[in-house]
Amino acid sequence: MRERTFIMIKPESVERGHIGEIITRFEHRGFRIVAMRMEKLSREKAEAQYEEHRGKDFFENLVSYICSAPVVLIVIEGEDAISTARKIVGETDPKKAEPGTIRADFGIDIQRNAIHAADSPEKAKLEIKLHFPELST
């Protein structure tokens, strides 16, 4: 099924020059970039992005980190985009991620794990609406 999903290249991947290689991995798998921009997230947007984690002990560090430098916000489209993107991205903890996944190759630790990818159709829709409201239907 053709669908759209949201991915975000995190600050350390931007700072370390991995944007092109990360995007290439999605393009080589047949995904089309629908929208993309680089942005330094406001605290408000970062809190909305990670709302599901509010109240957890890592929430404040996560929000501070994601606001610390620019990120690349991307909407991709293709067959089974959500589940396939999650496979390309790999496990949250880079130490546990399969070799060849983005997080295994570029992640530093569980917080600085290179990239975020929506994990469900509902989350993808919310994140696209948050970052690219012009694409929301």
Image: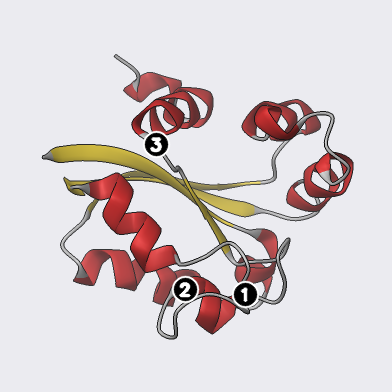
User: Left of 137 or right of it: where is 59?
Assistant: right
Using a 10 Å C-alpha cutoff, classify the residue at mark 3 as few (fewer than 14 neighbours), some (14 to 19) or many (20 or more): few
Q: Can you see residue 37? A: yes
- Of labels 2 and 1, earlier in sequence is 2
Q: Who's the residue at 84% across and 46% down the image? A: 58
Q: Secondary structure at mark 3?
A: loop
Tag shown at residue 120: 3
Cα gap from disc 3 to disc 1, whole angstroms = 22 Å
Residues 134 and 25: in front is 25
**Which circle's residue, 3 or 1, is located before the other in the chain?**
1
User: Against 14, is 120 above or below?
Assistant: above
Amino acid at circle 1: Gly
Outermost residue toward the front in this view: 96
Q: Position of residue 119 (x, y in %)?
A: 44, 43
Q: Nearer the viewer, residue 86 or 38?
A: 86
- The percent position of residue 62, horizontal first and vertical second, equals 79, 48
Marks 3,1: beta carbons within 8 A: no
Q: Position of residue 9 (x, y in %)?
A: 54, 58
Check disc 2: other Cα within 10 Å, few if <14, some if 14-19, many if 20+. Answer: many
Write down the quadrant of residue 88 in the picture.
Answer: bottom left
Please provide percent x and percent y for residue 90: 46, 67
Quarter residue 45 falls in? top right
Identify residue for label 2. Answer: 102
Q: Is residue 45 above or below residue 93?
A: above
Q: How is the rendered protein coloured?
A: secondary structure
**Residue that numbered label 1 is attached to:** 107
Alpha carbon distance from label 2 to label 1:
7 Å
Task: Please name the residue shown 24% across and 65% down the image.
Answer: 27
Disc 2 secondary structure class: helix
Which residue type carries mark 3? Ser
